[in-house]
Amino acid sequence: MLKLNDISKTFNSGTINEKRALDHVSLHLAPGDFVTIVGSNGAGKSTLFNAIAGGFYVDEGSVVLAGEDITFKPEYRRSREMGRLFQDPMRGTAPHMTIEENLALAYLRTAKKQNAFFSRTSKAERRFFQDQLALLDMGLEDRMKQPVGLLSGGQRQALTLLMATMVPPKVLLLDEHTAALDPGTAEKVLNITKDVVARNKITTLMVTHNMNQALELGNRTLMMDGGRIVLDVSGEERAGMTVGGLLERFRAGAGKDLDNDRILLSE
Amino acid sequence: MLLSITTIQTALAVGAIYSLVALALFISFSILNIADLSTDGCYTLGFAVGATVTLAGHPFLALPAAMAAGACSGFVTAFLQTKLGVESILAGIIVNTGLYTVNLAVMGWSSNLSIYGSDSLFSLAKGLSDAEWWRNWYKVIVPAAILLLICLFVAFFFRTRLGLSIRATGDNADMIRASSINPAFTITVGLCLANSLTALAGCLYGLLNTGCDINLGTGMVTVALASLVIGESLMGRGSIPKRIFGVVLGACLYRLIMAVAIGANIPTECFKLVSALIVAVAIATPQGRKLIALQRQKMAARRKGGTQQC
């Protein structure tokens, strides 16, 4: 589904602040893969996501999505086929627009024809949005006409998730999307994530700093360090792995201890 | 009497025209969150193009021609900031400066242009009926009708998918980047629309006064901002139709304040200072209210603290 062929990215090239953020990374995701990613601060997790989503163009290598080379496709064109959630719940929704208007925007992705630009939200679409909101089980379906700015962080993140997956994307990128939420809300959003991903069989990449989560969720775990993927476990090896074992393997792969000031080793 | 009926009529007619500019700034400043400073030049451009087309014998074509010219100006501003990486404020200033020469060229390298005596939108409208009330009021009714049409269109437009995309561009740039909307495109459409309204207003103003000079637009951006701020502080940030109504209300109020200033014999030379003051006061009002509330709270707390000490 998604192939990264030997991609590299260097920031501030030629200056004293030169930083090789991605160092010949190759990754191949099969359709339906749910991959969790852990790593130290500055390991290149978010940079990897930006390379996939098109926040910048990579210096070397290529990005291939479902057989199509998208290495030089601009970000807004890629996002037709990608959903993305950030850590900050405020980033994914427009606060001064209503829930319905936000959903209508997300639904634009399906619009292939230009004349859809001048269409307005139809009754059938409104009902569809309402049904989708009901699935979140947060009572948002009765608040369609309210501005999104009135919602809580968790509600906004759930809404963003719905907007990203309502039209199932080919790849879903989750960048610590529950990290800024309180534990109860985080769990709820995570459960919704699991449901949505399973229901639509979306190929998903998720950055987390919770080591248990990294092993429990999905079918594959990557660890990153210094712009490289130092560990890639899946299948039976992963099934039998503990947090301790994971850290051990990281030390072997990266040649140092995992260092992340926000990492959670246990619940 | 401070306000004669003619003063009120002029205030309403000009208020309707200023509402169009205020609407333009509402689109660029409030919705797209871009300070488009090409308003002054664009306003004059609208007049220059409209008057030239009127003089050429096409009184009705004047309005669409002016709007098209405005849209072109908006396109250049948008192109500079979306494709060439020019800071948005600077893009507006650059276009504004360039427009001065363009406007002179359109006006045939003369610094003023009169359409007195030739058929124009207003002279034709005047001839529609001989009724007393029509003769008195057509100068208000024509711009008001155009304003109403534009308001309905803008209200409709911002509920379409394209309109929603434009609103989201100004509301959350991060979100736009992560969704399938091209911000360069939405900014371009938004600025073209905004500047076409500015030019339409300039055209109407020039036609109403049967001629104007190259400095017609000077200070328009302040006037429009004043109207916008008055409107938004009165109506708040509600739904789009409500906000549009607020903008129109703000422009008419602003014009009435100016009419009072004229009635109070303030010399014409001072008008720009008066409008600058109105803008400053209007923008500062919400903050001033907060400061006063805080002072009250402090005083109340001090009083309370004082009794405890005793």
Image (tube, coloured by chain):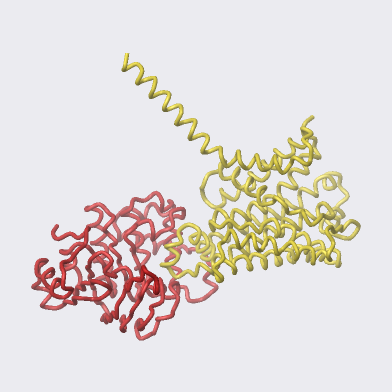
Residue A12: where, in percent of width, then height? 39, 71
The percent coordinates of residue A5 (x first, y second) are: 31, 84
Camera sees residue A124? no
The quarter of the picture where residue B73 lies is bottom right
Q: How many marks?
A: 0
Question: Residue at position x 43%, y 52% from top?
Answer: A147
The residue shown at (68%, 60%) is B96
Q: Is residue A132 above or below residue B22?
A: below
- In the image, taking residue A149 as reference, residue A181 lies left or right, namely left
Up the image or down, B192 lies above or below A9; here it is above
Q: Quadrant of residue A175?
A: bottom left
* Along the line of sight, the residue nearer the viewer: A228 or A160: A228
Identify which residue, A232 or B144, lies in the foreground. A232
Q: Give chain B's shade.
A: yellow
Chain identifier of the red chain = A
Please give left or right for residue B26 compared with residue A201 in the image. right
Relative height, residue A28 to residue B36 (above, below): below
- Judged left or right of residue A16, residue B143 is right
Q: Residue furthest top?
A: B310
Q: Residue furthest front?
A: A16
User: From this viewpoint, which residue is outermost toward the right?
Assistant: B117
Q: Considering the image in quadrants, where does the C terminus of chain A appear?
A: bottom left
Snapshot quadrant of residue A11? bottom left
Residue B18 coordinates in the image, percent (x, y): 70, 50
**Horizontal and vertical percent for residue A234?**
16, 77
- Asked if residue A117 can be seen in this view, the reply is yes
Where, quadrant-wise, is the N terminus of chain A in this rendering? bottom left
User: Would residue B15 be found to the left or right of residue B211 on screen?
Assistant: left
Q: Is residue B199 above or below residue B180?
A: above
